[in-house]
Every structure is written in structure tokens, then in C-alpha cells.
Amino acid sequence: MVVHKIGAWFGRFFSKLFLRKKKVRLGFYGPVNAGKSTLANKICKDWIGEEMSVVSKIPHETREIKVKEMVRIKSGGKELDFNLVDTPGIATKIDYQDFMKYKLSEKQAKERAKEATKGVIEAIKWLENVDCVLVILDATANPYDQVNITIIGNLAARNIPVLIVANKTDLKKSSIKRIESAFPQYKVIGLSARKGTNMKKFYKELFNLVR
């Protein structure tokens, strides 16, 4: 009972905090090529008519923090201003030779690997600057292979509200249930950022996250 009351108090506290700020710093986190930038672009296209990040099949296309400010999102008769924070893909190992598979020269590959490593470090540091986080996962892949325990641990330790996005549900091998089973402590929403499916429900869950 005491725990429930404390949890309810924190819920009301954060709700008032977000409403007072009227601007929410929303972090996009997850593994490489899970669709973080694609989702950030979809949100921006929906609400301000422009994209914010470059998308590529080459791993670690996003190698530095990118921020799009004042993205006003509406859902359920409410609206909030978000600062979207698109972060580099989290990886525990970055090998320059992996980039050479995409026809990059050795020099280009090594430079990209160096930038990507720096980007991962910056992404983790930015956890201090976000109010809530979307963890974007590839719904066609094993969830346990995608999430760096450091990120999940940091989110839990900081009590940062989290919504897990199971992306790429338009693909045959996708499984939302597999991700739900891996992370039962978090709400999971399935969508296709590329095709823009289930975005209305996504926005509803996003507002539930910050209310």
C-alpha cells in the first residue's frame, strides 16, 4: 500500500512537471539500424513537415547527437512541445572492417568507426539531458541481442520513463510478443516507422508516457 502511494505520488509529480514545462526532451535510443532515425523523421514529417536525420543502410549513419526542437505533437485533444534527441546506435563493439563491406575505403571505414565510437559515448552521456526515452528495437531480431544492458540499467537507475518501440512490424519475421516477453516491465508498442503504420496509437502511448 505504501509503495503504491509513493508510486502514485511520483506519477502525479512527473505529470505536473511535464505539463509545467510544456516541452519534453524525448531521447531515441536503441541498437544500430533498428529505425531510430526513421521514426524521428516520421514524427517530424507528421508534425512539422520536414525530416531531421539522414537514413542509410550503412551502420552508424547517425554518429552524433541530433536535436530537433519545438516539435508540437497532438493526441487525444492534448498537445505538447517536444525536443527530439536522435542518438547514435548503441553497440558494444565497432569494427572498421564491417564498414568496408559497404564499399568504404579502409581510411573511410576507420574514420567512421572512430566517429561511431565517440557517438556511443555521447549517447550515454545524453541520458542526463532527456526527460523520457523511446527504446527502438527491430521486431524481426532477437531482443536480447539488441539492447545494451548499460542503457537499460542507466534508464532504470535514473527513473527515466521508457516506451519500447517494436519497429519493422511490416516485415514477416517481426514479433511484438517476443519483445514484450523480454521486457515485461515496460510498455511495448509495435509499428512500422518506414510505412507509418500504427502511428496514432504510438502518439497515444507517447502522451501516456509523459502524463
Image (tube, grey):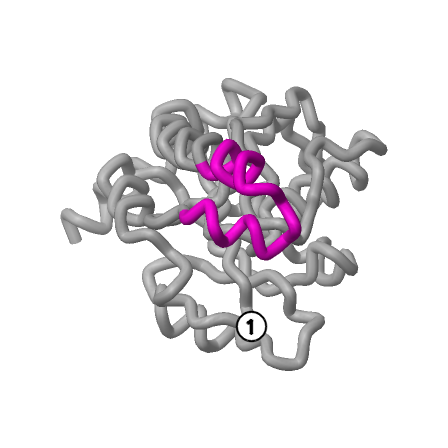
Q: Residue at x 57, y 21 (%)?
A: 22
Vertical comparison of 5 with 63: above or below: below
Circle 1 — which element? loop
- Dominant SS type (magenta): helix
Picture mark count: 1
Q: Quadrant of residue 84?
A: top right
Q: Nearer the viewer, residue 97 or 94?
A: 97
Label 1 sits on residue: 140
Q: Who's the residue at 23% across and 50% down the image?
A: 4
178 versus 48 height, above or below: below
In the rendered view, would you say 68 is above or below 178?
above
Residue 161 is one of the magenta-drawn residues: no
Kind of residue at badge 1: Thr
User: Which residue in the rendered view is the most extreme toward the front?
Assistant: 106
Please state if 61 lies on the left or on the right of 124 as rendered.
right
Magenta stretch in the rendered image: 95-113
110 falls in the magenta region: yes
Report x, y in % for residue 50.
82, 32
Q: Is residue 58 left or right of residue 29?
A: right
Report whether residue 64 is seen: yes
Q: Position of residue 118 (x, y in %)?
A: 41, 29
Where is residue 151 drawn, in percent x and y? 32, 45
Q: Is residue 13 visible?
A: no
Residue 172 as seen in the image, left or right of residue 85: right
